[in-house]
């Protein structure tokens, strides 16, 4: 008797479930009529359309505050960092003079990096500016003075490190050239009172007797004022970033040398703070191996 009762209960449960899915008497689907389902779907449709509209309005208002040519807010370091070329995976220049493959990668990287600085390319795209003064190009009120002109930085300025007279940039002779560039910051005016910023390099204290003599190109490692201010990629499409080349003339071979280069300017000095390792400076390892 109990077994039959259980069977009837199971049958009733199945019938109740089927009736929940679709009740032909009340014409309800999942417990709701067609009009009830329609009202719910309409509510969520209106809700999500309104939510999407509010998001779109917020984005529109925010985009109206942005400038296509200049960031509204800049949260970069007050002092831009430096970077070296050639740069592979790590900040180091390590090679063996007798092993051509060990230094040819650096030569190829420099060739590729300096290609846009060829004199013929610079003459076609950029202007010959007056040195030792900022090349300011103001807008006329709401009328933008775009695209803005850029000053020539000819490869020949790098002289012994241009790769024109010595296609191996000194790597074959154990006198390598390393290029230094100051990271771009829109509107930055380095230097003060007509004094151009310059780059200086030296060994860390423990390696000071290993670095030997250095040569800078342009002379004194100067970054001329005429390359500033920078107006951004969109406004100044042909901008050629100024470079400083450092040639290491007689470093101690088969030894690690920790080198640090920094920017020097009246209104911009490296902090020396280890938390801002690249603020106004760059450090790298130099090692030239040679069979004795």
Image (cartoon, helix red, strand yellow):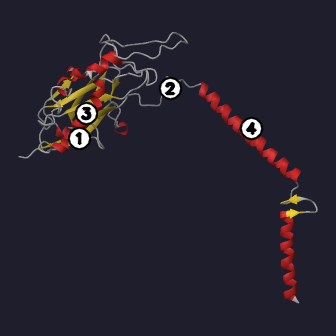
Q: Secondary structure at mark 1?
A: helix
Are circles 2 and 4 on residues that touch, CB within 8 Å?
Answer: no
Q: Residue at x 48, y 28 (%)?
A: 74
Image-based side of 81 in relation to 15, left or right: left
Measuring from the top left, give residue 100's x and y in whole percent.
15, 43
Residue drawn 83% across and 73% down? 14
Q: Secondary structure at mark 2?
A: loop
Q: Earlier in the sequence, mark 4 or mark 3?
A: 4
Q: Can you give x and y, in whole percent of width and height, for residue 61 in the image?
A: 64, 28
Whether tag 4 and tag 3 are in contact, CB under 8 A, the answer is no
Please state which of the two labelled residues, at mark 4 or mark 3, is closer to the viewer: 3
Callouts 1 and 2 close, C-beta under 8 Å: no
Q: CA distance from mark 1 to mark 2?
A: 37 Å
User: Alpha carbon of mark 3 to alpha carbon of mark 2: how far?
Assistant: 31 Å
Q: Residue at x 8, y 46 (%)?
A: 291
Name the N-terminal-most of marks 1 and 4.
4
Q: Secondary structure at mark 4?
A: helix
Q: Nearer the viewer, mark 3 or mark 2?
A: 3
Mark 4 vs mark 3, CA separation in Å: 55 Å
Alpha carbons under labels 2 and 4: distance apart = 31 Å
Q: Report crowding for label 3: few under 14, some 14 to 19, many 20 or more residues within 10 A (C-alpha).
A: many
Mark 2 or mark 4, which is nearer to you?
4
Q: Any mark on residue 63, and which?
A: none
Q: Residue furthest right?
A: 25
The label on residue 50 is 4
Q: Which residue is mark 3?
A: 110
Left or right: 212, with 135 as reference point:
left
Residue assigned mark 1? 105
Question: Is the residue 29 above or below the residue 86 in the image?
Answer: below
Q: Earlier in the sequence, mark 2 or mark 4?
A: 4
- According to the picture, the residue beneath numbered tag 2 turns out to be 71
């Amino acid at each position: 008797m109990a077994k039959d009762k259980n069977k009837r209960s199971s049958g009733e449960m199945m019938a109740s479930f089927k009736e929940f899915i679709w009740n032909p008497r009340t014409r309800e689907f999942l417990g709701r009529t067609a009009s009830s389902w329609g009202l719910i779907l309409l509510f969520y449709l209106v809700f999500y359309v309104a939510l999407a509209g509010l998001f779109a309005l917020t984005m529109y208002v925010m985009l109206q505050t942005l400038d296509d040519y200049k960031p509204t807010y800049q949260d970069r370091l007050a002092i831009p960092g430096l970077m070296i070329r050639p740069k592979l995976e790590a900040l180091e220049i390590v090679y063996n003079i007798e092993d051509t493959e060990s230094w040819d990668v650096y030569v190829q990287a420099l060739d590729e990096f300096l290609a846009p600085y060829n004199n013929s390319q610079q003459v076609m795209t950029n202007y010959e500016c007056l040195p030792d003064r900022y090349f300011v190009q103001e807008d006329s009120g709401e009328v933008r003075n775009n695209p803005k002109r850029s000053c020539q930085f000819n490869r020949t300025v790098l002289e012994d490190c241009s790769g024109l007279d010595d296609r191996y940039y000194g790597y074959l002779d154990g006198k390598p050239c390393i290029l230094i560039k100051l990271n771009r910051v829109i509107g930055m005016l380095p230097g003060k009172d007509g004094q151009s910023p310059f780059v200086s390099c030296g060994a860390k204290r423990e390696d000071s007797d290993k670095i030997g003599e250095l040569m800078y190109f342009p002379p004194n490692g100067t970054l001329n004022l005429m390359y500033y201010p920078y107006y951004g990629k969109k406004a100044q499409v042909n901008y050629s970033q100024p470079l400083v080349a450092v040639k290491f003339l007689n470093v101690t071979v088969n030894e690690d040398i920790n080198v640090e280069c920094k920017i020097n300017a009246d209104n911009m000095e490296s902090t020396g703070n280890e938390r801002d390792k690249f603020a106004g400076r760059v450090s790298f390892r130099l090692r030239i191996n040679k069979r004795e």
